[in-house]
Image (cartoon, grey):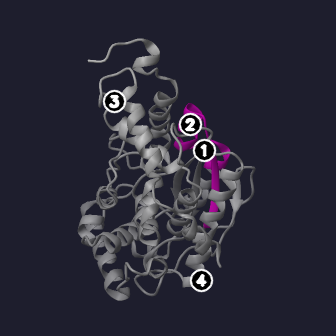
Amino acid sequence: MTSLETTLAAIRPADERAVAAARDLQARLTKPAGSLGALEELSVRLAGLAGVCPPPLPTPATVAVFAGDHGVHAQGVSPWPQEVTAQMVANFVAGGAVVNAFARQNGADVMVIDVGVAIPLHGGATLLDANVRRGTRDMTVEPALTREEALAAVEIGVQVAGTLVAQGAKALLTGDMGIANTTPAAALIAVFTGTSAGAATGRGTGIDDETLARKIAIVDAALERHRPDPADPLGALASVGGLEHAALTGFILGAAANRVPVIIDGVIAASAAVVAAAFAPDAVAAMVAGHRSAEPGAGVALAHLGLEPLLDLGMRLGEGSGAVLALPIVAAAVRVMHEVATFDAAGVSEK
């Protein structure tokens, strides 16, 4: 069996006994029932994922930033030069990006994985060289990847998740970097949600109306050329995905197999999440939507998954920034179950 097959076999539904115990505990804590809103349901979901009540605190946590380049960049879908991908990876390694600042603020580690950057990178303590190929092919001309390349990237994500959990991570956070990567993300979201290219495609790093119209047409053209089948998630990744999208898919599946929560960042991670759910529907139990990205495709993907984001700040940066900002909220939801007294223990009268 491949590591992907082993991983898929390990993904199971939420533990209903732990879910029931968590609901019972929430009802007995010294607060009005339901007064913590979405945090209560989140804590119940995390108990079901872990199979124990209360669930483990989601610390320590690591954000894994998967980086890759894209042949479709040649179609003019981004105003940024492709070289920026490698330059930003160096910035992550040096600790100078937004995700690094947010991670320091919230006590998370940052790991960067080169899974498909076009320019060879120099090493660093937080950089893993796992390059499958130097960027994808242009999906408007030919499949972006072979099935073998897509599988290799997925399995890198699985392995990174497993390694981080083995090293003690109690929460995994999705990050990404890749100039032009919102174009394959839009294509994947359209495939797996059944929505149109227009509804799934946004402005990415900030493009004008003319470029947005061209970007939508390019996504449409790629979908028409390849006709990806949502029942064949690996084939869809190969046709119109990116190497970081594939690796994030594996990373999410690896978190689910290890029964560790994975906080989903923006549109790139959301596109990987819908692919992961196609591989294993029960993987959704491990997913926590960190924030509502300003990219329209992210909202479409989260709705498809039935996930409600914790934050809505109008962000569209990527990198893992929104996932890291959501981490303390996830931790707070769990800490309530560990530290808040019950009515009986505190001697507080119930209504």
Give the crowd class for mark 3: few <14, some 14-19, many >=20 residues within 10 Å: few
Determine the CA span between mark 4 and mark 2: 37 Å
**Residue matched to label 1:** 170
Q: Is residue 298 left or right of residue 162?
A: left
What residue appears at the point 24 percent right and 65 percent down from the top-left corner? 199
- Disc number placed over residue 36 in the picture, else none: 3
**Residue matched to label 4:** 148
What residue appears at the point 50 percent right and 35 percent down from the top-left corner? 331
Q: Which type of secondary structure does the marked residue at label 4 adopt?
A: helix
Amino acid at circle 2: Leu
Sequence-wise, the earlier of marks 4 and 3 is 3
What residue appears at the point 59 percent right and 53 percent down from the top-left corner? 64
Amino acid at circle 1: Lys
- For residue 19, what is the image quadrant? top left
Q: Is residue 59 visible?
A: yes
Can you say which quadrant of the picture contains the C terminus? top left
- Tell me whether circle 4 and circle 2 mark residues in contact (CB < 8 Å): no
**Residue matched to label 2:** 57
Determine the CA span between mark 1 and mark 3: 23 Å
Amino acid at circle 4: Glu
Sequence-wise, the earlier of marks 2 and 1 is 2
Q: Position of residue 256 (x, y in %)?
A: 53, 58
Determine the CA span between mark 2 and mark 3: 18 Å
Q: Which residues are the magenta region?
A: 92-116
Amino acid at circle 3: Leu
